[in-house]
Image: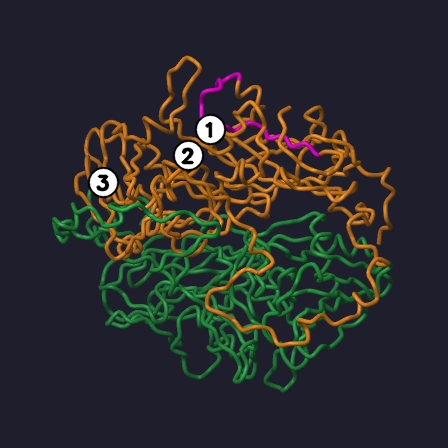
Chain colours: A green, B orange
Amino acid sequence: MSRQKNPASFEFAAGNGLLHRREFLRGGASLGGAAALAFSSITQAQSTDTPLWMKVPGRGMEGYGQRSRYEDNTLRTVGSAAGTVGAGASRTPLERLEGVITPSALHFERHHNGIPDIDPAQHRLLIHGLVERPLFFDLESLSRYPLVSRIQFLECSGNGRANIGATPAQSTAGELHGLLSCSDWTGVPLSILLDEAGLAPGAAWVAAEGADSAAMVRSIPIEKILDDAIVAIYQNGERLRPGNGYPMRLFLPGWEGNASVKWLRRLKVTAEPVMARDETSKYTDLQPDGHARMFTFPMGVKSVITSPSGGQSMNGPGLYQISGVAWSGAGAIRRVEVSADGGRTWADAALTEPLLSKSLTRFRIPWRWNGDAAVLLSRAIDDTGAQQPSRDALLSDRGLKFNYHYNAVQSWVVAQSGEVSNVYV
Amino acid sequence: MSRQKNPASFEFAAGNGLLHRREFLRGGASLGGAAALAFSSITQAQSTDTPLWMKVPGRGMEGYGQRSRYEDNTLRTVGSAAGTVGAGASRTPLERLEGVITPSALHFERHHNGIPDIDPAQHRLLIHGLVERPLFFDLESLSRYPLVSRIQFLECSGNGRANIGATPAQSTAGELHGLLSCSDWTGVPLSILLDEAGLAPGAAWVAAEGADSAAMVRSIPIEKILDDAIVAIYQNGERLRPGNGYPMRLFLPGWEGNASVKWLRRLKVTAEPVMARDETSKYTDLQPDGHARMFTFPMGVKSVITSPSGGQSMNGPGLYQISGVAWSGAGAIRRVEVSADGGRTWADAALTEPLLSKSLTRFRIPWRWNGDAAVLLSRAIDDTGAQQPSRDALLSDRGLKFNYHYNAVQSWVVAQSGEVSNVYV
């Protein structure tokens, strides 16, 4: 087998220590032993003692498992409007997670008046309006329809907007971009339910209403509803969680999360959008000229490095793996480039297959940190050819008054001390 | 849009009501309104009343989310040997789940002396034996190595063995086949760690030891270790659960679960298998001639219909969707056939993409139940061409003394009453 390699023989892929993405995988010796604990540093006691937990029987099994008590600090960041507990958001701690599936207990939530406690036996979904046959469904009857399952992301349109601010917020990756999660969603295609109801002439929009006490309503173009929209009833194998719309929610792949109305109770087919509160007072994009764009549903192509990221610390110079997630509301991720020198040079990261449409894609690339200050960036390209913009380009295009659909490149600066923080480049 | 279709125009794909797998999807009207609640059956009050939960603010967000109190009965089935709490298994309730991801809290577990409570700061993995450089790793140092993520199943080799018995056990799909789960696993390829350690001449096996009080040890051929084995440290985004080996486990894609040693503390490279207790007294396949086959690691191609399945009840004649999971330790699922007439005729089920290697694949096919007794079966074929055997064929080949690697076709009988139960055909 291969011997340890001289660092000089690393195959560098871009400036400031970015290694070719295959460097790690084609022979671990490339690591130069940087990460393994030195054998000599392990005391004889540590290496030969039988640990306490091998001397006593372990605890028994349980019907519904729990996390290790050493991992209980992996939590969502929760924030609510003053004086409320339910008007706010909880954010996925992206920097603590790996892979692409978000555990349902850590899925982001954005509520307008809290989480309703719905008895599924009393909940009904009504499809009415411009249809030939109005229809009711409960959870039991919906479950007899053909189900489809897809691993797809959900992102709040306000995700990342702190970076519109003039000063970079000193936050973690999850606090900045954690209104983003990814699940194995299972539900009934709405094309089937609407075909059964029969669309009447003039049907062009669908107003979706939630059964929360904010009575969330959004208008959705009928084309999206007939394309890939589902009424989701399972998330990551289990029934939906209450915070994600139990017992049923609208799910619009790739579109802003707010439109995927939770606790879905009504779909009214209409000729025009209903101009609901949450599509006039909110979820519009104010432009520099004072006019707002409405119904800007699809989420743009975006990526974020989650390790290393804001608030984390490097453990001394040496070899690291840069890891992050990329996604696009338009389709699959085709390519993610990473820079370790503030954007002067870029290298392709390895993408974890399968490259699914409207899903998270995990990217990784090895990096040899030399101990100097360094700025890390990632930029994604989707399979329509759309590329994630720089912050300057996005703000120059959109102005400073908008609140939604911020998808610019995230930059992290690694200080000489090893501290990682948010920076604008 | 299309009108309701006369049942006579259904496109039948096989005997006793199996519909072509596209029948549901090409126009919901094929359902003939069988599943939607009759509009007239909804009382005026039900259709117009504002439900209680829309009249009060909902509850606030929390750092780690919970399930609905109406879904708390979705639990694993737990069983232990007499006088113990930790020598036994908990089974995934397959019949309550959809999609392919198993929530970590419902992942099956099989323990030999309970779940150790390991402090990750004190846990070490030692790689030694026939290596040039013995190496230690802790969770922190392992995390700096290149990680890979894959959605793959894990199955206990004893899964389904109740069906070897002469009388069909009256159990649910999960009780019979729920030593099977599927997760998004993330870990470090062992090829990298062993390359760094450097294999010495004669290296042919690796003995993997767990840090539980049963000190589980299994011998693994070095070829598998260098092929696709990982040291897993994340499961479905989060760190592993204690019941699945926290802080690190061996993960051998497609191989019997017992060999994917949990709480991994030691990998000793050897010239021969160590003939550990759990590969001599257990996990061998006793043949009719009294000789046992050892080291029969790969799990065979298998499938099971999870809905409808044992213990469930049909809600009257009409249209249903048959849903289940298929998997193979040799690769991806290529095809799943379903029969509704006890195996006389078969139709292809729709497979949910992506068709991943050594992963669960969800299959579904619509079925029009006419109310008579019917026997449902599924059989899977993987991309090596291997086909799931009938129970008769498997027992004729393997005898009646074996305990592991039972992968025969599962049959469910639907009685006229609608009750579903296990049956041998």
Indicate whether residue B398 is drawn in magenta.
Answer: yes
Kind of residue at badge 1: His
Against A153, is B93 above or below?
A: above
Asked if residue A71 lies left or right of residue B124, the reply is right
Relative to residue A5, is residue B258 drawn left or right? right
Q: Is residue B114 visible?
A: yes
Whether residue B261 is situated above or below residue A303 in the rendered picture:
above
Decide if residue B135 is on the left or right side of residue B212.
Answer: left
- Check the residue under mark 1 and report the chain it is in: B
Q: In this figure, which residue is indicated by the disc labeled 3?
A: A2
- Name the disc covering residue B256, or none: 2
Residue type, numbered disc 3: Ser
- Residue type highlighted by circle 2: Glu
- In three-dimensional space, the C-alpha distance between marks 2 and 1, rounded to whole angstroms, equals 8 Å
Asked whether residue A9 appears in the rendered view, the answer is: no
Q: Secondary structure at mark 3?
A: loop
Q: Which residues are magenta?
A: B396-414
Image quarter hosting the N terminus of chain A: top left
Bin the neighbour count of mark 3 within 10 Å (Cα to Cα): few under 14, some 14-19, many 20 and up: few
Callout 2–callout 1 Cβ contact below 8 Å: yes
Measure how far apart labels 2 and 3 are at the Cα level: 31 Å
